[in-house]
Image (cartoon, rainbow, N blue to C red):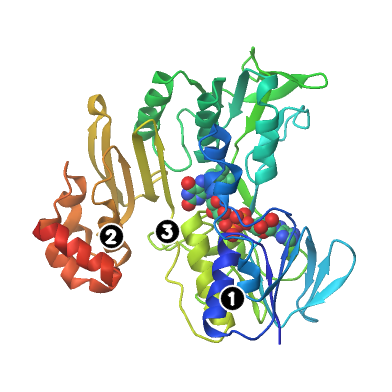
Amino acid sequence: MAYVIIGNSAAAVSAVEAIRSVDRDTPISLYCDEQAPIYSRCMLSYYLAGHVEKDDLRFRDDGWYERMAVEPHLGSAVTGLDADRKKLRLADGSEASYDKLLVATGAKARSLGRPGEELPGVFRLRNLPDAEGIVARLGEANRVAVLGGGLVGLKAAYALRERGMEVSVLVRSDHLMSQVADARAGDLIRERLEEKGIEVRTGVDAKAIAGDGGVKAVELSEGGAVECGMVVVGKGVDSNLDVVKESGIEAHWGIVTDEHMQTSAPEVYAAGDVAETRDLLTGERTVNAIWPNASEQGRVAGFNMAGRERTYPGSLAMNSVDFYGRSLMAVGKVRKLDQGAEEVVDYQPERGRYRKLVIRDGRLIGLLIVGSMQGVGTALALIKAGVPVAEIQEVLLAEDFDYAKILHLVKQYPEAFGRREFLLTVKSAVG
Ligand SMILES: Cc1cc2nc3c(=O)[nH]c(=O)nc-3n(C[C@H](O)[C@H](O)[C@H](O)COP(=O)(O)OP(=O)(O)OC[C@H]3O[C@@H](n4cnc5c(N)ncnc54)[C@H](O)[C@@H]3O)c2cc1C
């Protein structure tokens, strides 16, 4: 009997720890195409900004593999999978066998698909080598164009501004963070970035990256160009499906998983940015590519692989950022609303404050907040537990989160909280 894990990040690590909490003896082999130690991608922009050292990115130390009795194969890419023979194909041409397999290959940065993308000085920000590449080139350019106004693009823009660079963010849509937020929220973030000297241009499309042996400019479809010595492409991510491509395992946006994180093939599980799951709020099948989902899915997969049944309730689309003290949190579906979805809004742009609830059939399917995040953790726990919205609508929209007004709900849904969180929430409510 042998477990095999493909990946070495959020989903893989929590799967290993779940397996080992149940089964100390069965061998676990872990394959990863990167050579790097176990590190946090979420922290890459802080490293890029110069706020933390490379070593601070680690979320497990080198001794972890030994303590977990894991045989690591770092720098060893898996190229394919034969689910009938229970074999993996490795990049060096060899094969490896598994009895139970977890595919936790995450996602890759989407390419721009425009000429000039391979020029030196064009980067993505998905992994440690990407961040190291940008840091190594910092002295060679003083102006950078960031293509894309999503979470990763804006984090890169912020980080490079912190390094003293002139930064232009070029965005095709008409507002920032258009995949997760609406125009009001995007514009509040834009306002703060512009105050800090980051140029934001919306409604513009990069036609090509011009240069000769290095980046010189981004040419725009609308005409004109933005001169720069570096480009960071932040156009979103796609699940890393290469491993399962010819395996017959069902995959759409990601690898389709059931409530045990099992795929369509026996004894093959998937978790994290590579896995398609049911969205907790909308019920739709999707890839909600964020760290907490990856960790939780990995944990559930690990337990099930080790024979302890656990059910995954569904993933939450949740994005949060803070730029220069202005925070945004987007949960669930807050844009492209279907008929029947209703918005309840408190919008005070002059105070940098915005709250929107999206409700369908009496249930909350989206929550968008710019400004104070007070009480959001408690609200989320209640939302996940399926509390009817009518009861908490007013509390969620209110200027100050009033714990006292939800105390009855906290008591009614104690399963929504861990014991410690439950006690803390009750304590906050009673003062
Ligand atoms: C710059 C940046 C900032 C982010 N900020 C946030 C944030 O603030 N909050 C948040 O929740 N999320 C954030 N994310 C997203 C978060 O990092 C991901 O959701 C999370 O890393 C997913 O974990 P994972 O284990 O599924 O996959 P990944 O972290 O993508 O890891 C996949 C692993 O599989 C390995 N692998 C891939 N293909 C193969 C192969 N063929 N063979 C062998 N190994 C392979 C990779 O080397 C890697 O070890 C951010 C991401 C980036 C890039």
Q: Residue at x 33, y 64 (%)?
A: 384
Secondary structure state at the residue bearing disc 3: loop
The three-letter code of the residue at mark 1 reads Gln
- Residue 197 percent coordinates (x, y): 46, 18
* Lateral position of residue 225 relative to residue 330, left or right: right
- The residues tagged by marks 1 and 2 sit, at their Cα atoms, a distance apart of 30 Å
Quarter residue 124 falls in? top right
Which mark is on residue 262? 1
The three-letter code of the residue at mark 2 reads Asp
Query: Between disc 1 and disc 2, whose residue precedes?
Result: 1
Question: Can you identify the residue that label 3 sits on?
Answer: 316
* Lateral position of residue 359 relative to residue 152, left or right: left
Q: Residue at x 24, y 65 (%)?
A: 387
Q: Number of numbered discs present?
A: 3
* Lateral position of residue 395 relative to residue 329, left or right: left
Q: Is residue 97 above or below residue 287?
A: below
Nearer the observer: mark 1 or 2; the answer is 1
Secondary structure state at the residue bearing disc 2: loop
Q: Residues within 10 Å of mark 2 (few under 14, many from 20)?
A: few
Q: Residue at x 21, y 50 (%)?
A: 396
- Residue 108 percent coordinates (x, y): 66, 49
Q: Is residue 164 above or below residue 344?
A: above
